[in-house]
Image (cartoon, rainbow, N blue to C red):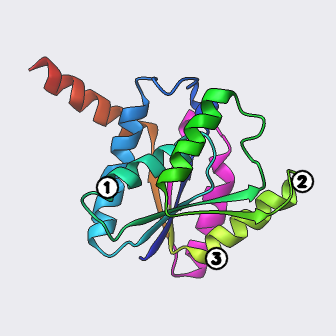
Amino acid sequence: MKNLLVSGYRAHELNIFSQKHEGIPYIKKAIAGRLIPLIEDGLEWVITPGQYGVDLWACEVVVALKQQYPHLKCSIMMAYQNMEEKWKEDKKEYFQQICAGVDYVGVVSRQPYQGIWQLKARDELLFRKTDGLLLVYDEDAGEGSPRFMKELALKKQQAGGYQYISISSEDIQSIADEERLFMDL
């Protein structure tokens, strides 16, 4: 696998409203834990849609991993121009900081949001340009925006040659439990 799409919940879908939320480091560790074996197996690019939440946390993970794996590259591919325009100021600053650290930032539609077709066009491009999807999603926790990515990935996987990898809330919880156990020792 050379190119991997990474996505998942938006922050608000996880009831995360601050970058200081205690759950974010565990989500990042879960992402890193799935990425490292893929990187060591030849992964070159991690691509995200750049939504506020798992997408940007994944970018942070990749930027940090580039110290150890300098060949690794990261890209944000947004659906439309000025995606972050209506975000709060602190989220905009965080987004701009992440964009400055990745290797490529692109936009599928060079216009502001006009309709769902822009999101569909972005997803089509992302799935065409990647060999697999790493998705932070847990159906048991309730449906959310990642459901659509999962459906597309599974269709592409059935057609052959596409890999679907998931991170569930149980995976993240076990990382948190292990860390707490280690801290108590």
The answer to whether residue 169 is above or below residue 102 is: above
The amino acid type found where label 3 is placed reads Arg
First of labels 2, 3 by sequence position: 2
Mark pair 2, 1: CA separation? 35 Å
Reading the image, the residue beneath label 1 is: 65
**Which residue is located at x 14 percent, y 18 percent?**
184
Magenta stretch holds residue 156: yes
**Real-space Cα distance between discs 2 and 3?**
21 Å
Q: How many marks?
A: 3
The residue at which mark 3 appears reads as: 128
Disc 2 on helix, strand or loop? loop
Q: How many residues crowd around disc 2 within 10 Å: few (fewer than 14), some, or many (20 or more)?
A: few
Helix, strand or loop under label 3: helix
| Span colored in magenta | 134-162
Residue denoted by label 2: 115
Q: Amino acid at mark 1?
A: Leu
| Residue drawn at point x = 65 percent, y = 40 percent | 143
